[in-house]
Image (tube, rainbow, N blue to C red):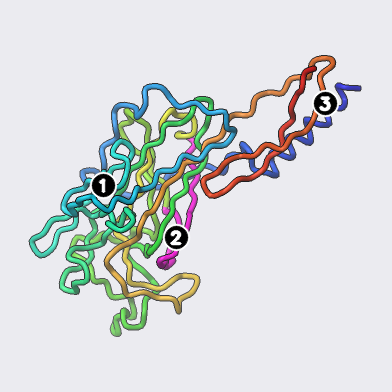
Amino acid sequence: MLTSVVKILLRLFVISLMSLGYGVVSPAAAAVSIKLPENALPAIPAQPLQLVRPQTDAGVRYDRISPVVNGQATYNPALCNVAAYWSATQVSVGGRAIGNGVDVCKVQAQTDDGALKFLTKWPLNNIHYPLTPAPAWAQFRFSIPQGHTASTLEYELSWYKLFGSMPTHCHPTEIDSTTGLCKLDVSTDWQPDVPAGLFLLWAKPGDSQYTVTGPHDPIEKIGYSGKQVFQAAVPEAMRGVDEVIVTLLTYNQYTKACEKANPSACTTHENENLELHSVSLKTTRALQPLHQPAHNTHVFWEMVRLGKPTGNRLSLCLCEQRP
């Protein structure tokens, strides 16, 4: 009798896990073929972030990297160094923007909240200097807890404008009256045929090359001051590694265009592609095979609360209670 009850509970347990999303891995991100300038990309770290991986009892874990506001920090926009706001061991940024005889980092920390602004040009707010194609990037490192598998990346953005290298929907003032196409205020080395969206570069310590996925959201959408969280699945090759290194990259993304889904929503702003506020990695513990409870063991259902940076959710657990 007890065996039959356990079998029924096991079936209900699996159904409950699937409906609650516990331990269910989202489809893996597909690799994309895009030619990126290798000399402008970050080097893949050779050594792991931590020699001993962290431990956790949680079934689902979110590791979040975000800036610390520091009103006393000194910041030099020419240097690609955001350690005054972000973890120096986990975060690095890069890319160069050159204009008017000045060479600055293409990803800059905002002194009010530490957000990372991905620039498109330099100087800002100057119509005499066009958008430049050099990649802008921010790299993040996550040490995966023991027994866990990486599944989902979350990134929090505002002020996003990613319309690819050749946008097809533009404000009426940005359309060439002769060709009917979008006018492009870009430098001569602007690259054609780069699709709209954000690209992600994945690796583990010691790799010789990146796995590139994308384009990812936001694609042909306009973001304002309100923060929006977007998600991307971790590639299959990165799910079982001890450390995930992920780089968020913008490349040849024009900004002065209109939303694909709403052509009446347009922007003529050109200074940046996006502002990045935080990056989180979701990991899950592999489900352990359930054994038949011993004699005189009470089988019961228990609601287990799973923590998340933005709140909590509940999951069902088939537990044993020994006398």
- List x then y, in percent, for residue 27: 56, 43
Compared to 263, does 92 lie above or below?
above
- Which mark is drawn over residue 82? 1
Answer left or right for 16 relative to 200: right
Q: Report helix, strand or loop for mark 3.
A: helix
Task: List the residue tagged with mark 2.
Answer: 227
Quarter holding the N terminus?
top right
Q: Using the image as rendered, state which of residue 49 and residue 111 is in the foreground.
A: 111
Whichever of labels 3 and 2 marks the residue nearer the N terminus, that label is 3
Compared to 208, does 132 lie above or below?
below
- List x then y, in percent, for residue 8: 84, 31
- Which residue is situated farthest in the bottom direction here? 177
- Which mark is drawn over residue 6? 3
Structural distance between the alpha carbons of marks 3 and 2:
46 Å
Circles 3, 1 touching at the beta carbon (< 8 Å)? no
- Kindly identify the amino acid type of the residue bearing the numbered disc 2: Lys
Residue visible at 35% across and 48% down in the picture? 67
- Kindly identify the amino acid type of the residue bearing the numbered disc 3: Val
- Kindly identify the amino acid type of the residue bearing the numbered disc 1: Val
Extent of the magenta region: 215-236
Q: Alpha-carbon neighbours of circle 3 within 10 Å: few (<14), some, or many (≥20)?
A: some
Compared to 102, does 129 lie above or below?
below
Residue visible at 13% across and 56% down in the picture? 103
